[in-house]
Amino acid sequence: MASHSRFTDDIWCTPAPGAPLIDLRTIDELRNEIFSSGYDELQQALFQAEEMKSKDLYEKYAPNFKDKNKQYIFKYINEIKRYSPSPSRSLLVTRWKPFLPDRTPDKLLPTSTKVTFQADAFKYESCGDNDSVEWYLNFANHDLFAYYSGPLLAQDELQVLECVELAALREFFVQTINTVGSYTTGSDKHTQKTVPTPILISNTERVIKIDTTKVYGNAFAKATERQLIQACEYLKKPQTVNLIAIEAPSHGRGLYTLDQVQYILTTCYVGFKAAEILARKTHRLNAANERSMSRGENTRLRTIIHTGWWGCGAYGNNRQMMILAQILAAYWTQVHEIIFHTQTNEHDSDIRAARETAEKLLQEKSVDRVLEEIVKLNLQWERSNNT
């Protein structure tokens, strides 16, 4: 059987776009809810925003899995477990323009952001703090969820299968003339260079948990029904999930260039800063699910970002580079904590080197100077693992 990857499969598309079949709240209505005081100067960074009822989305834009194993799991979710989103739950989708500060924030302390490494995978379990908003990275393709329906089960496709509502969101993207769109990258009108346009999704839910030990990547297409049953666990209570969808650069060769370093740092910075800006609006949406609100509107919310080896598998990025960039972005955006889920301990040397470099670069106030110093590290691209 031929090997499959997101780089060779056809993108599953639906008929030409039309008018939306569901009610939407758009950016003009949402802007004041998204931007609290202190973020006025960043309002222009929000490209588009839409809020929709999850149940309407799921029913009007039904997921359309093509792979037989994904069809089997989808049938299990819908026909056996009879999953249906709550009619009161809303999904918020925002897309952001690229931006990067000239200087790092004042009063940046070594203890201002907690950096944690855990040798595990995403579990989506709440930290239990009602004043925290937790985000998880989606290691996105430039066309978000474009391969959800096919036989591959990489990180992006896994998130869609576990949070099956995201498959309906993809169908909405391609069937509808909508304002957000599905692209996590764009083109600069002046330079014609590719630039990041991160998409953040607030308040989806994880319905099943999949043990990927024997079914990850290309192995999923070969799995038997018995293996699928053993791998899948339907969650009695869905987990609330907020996602940061960003695409890493891919398949580079040799040393990282200044343009590549700037793209990586900008991508992380915008995604993390957008998460921090969205904290209050997202907290309200999440809290509506849990029926437990924060102590008050004036309480400062903690932003926690869960990430991992972003861009380091199929895309072939250097592990030190991607850890370093995410640590710097977390400090610069002043999120409260970033948690790296490394799955194993086999790359401890890369982690130590990245942390040591980050400590030095955090003393530098000029962002341009930081970019130049990273280039001088002479970090090299690695090889794709073809998953």
Image (cartoon, rainbow, N blue to C red):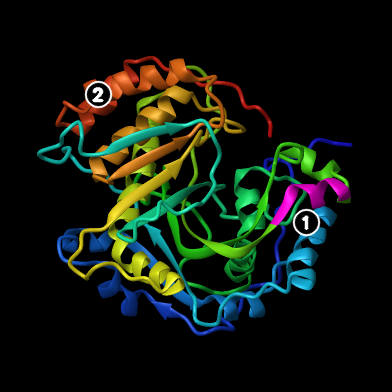
SS for dot 2: helix
Q: Quadrant of the N terminus?
A: top right
Q: Position of residue 160 (x, y in %)?
A: 63, 56
Amino acid type of the residue that numbered disc 2 sits on in the rendered structure: Glu
- 347 up-or-down from 37: above or below: above
209 horizontally vs 114: left or right = right
Residue 359 shows which numbered tag?
Answer: 2
Disc 2 crowd, CA 10 A, few/some/many (<14, 14-19, 20+): some
For disc 1, the marked residue is: 70
In the rendering, at what x and y percent does residue 41 appear?
A: 17, 59
Amino acid under disc 1:
Lys
Q: What residue do we see at 10% from left, 40% from top?
A: 106
Predominant SS of the magenta segment? helix
Coordinates of residue 110 in the picture (x, y in percent): 19, 31
Query: Would you place residue 86 above or below residue 282 in this image?
Result: below
Q: Which residues are magenta?
A: 226-233
Q: Which mark is residue 146?
A: none
- Secondary structure under the numbered disc 1 in the rendered image: helix
Quadrant occupied by the C terminus: top right
Number of numbered markers: 2
- Residue 216 location, x and y as percent? 71, 39
Compared across the picture, whether 6 is left or right of 90 comes to right
Q: Is residue 231 magenta?
A: yes
| Residue situated furthest left in the rendering | 107
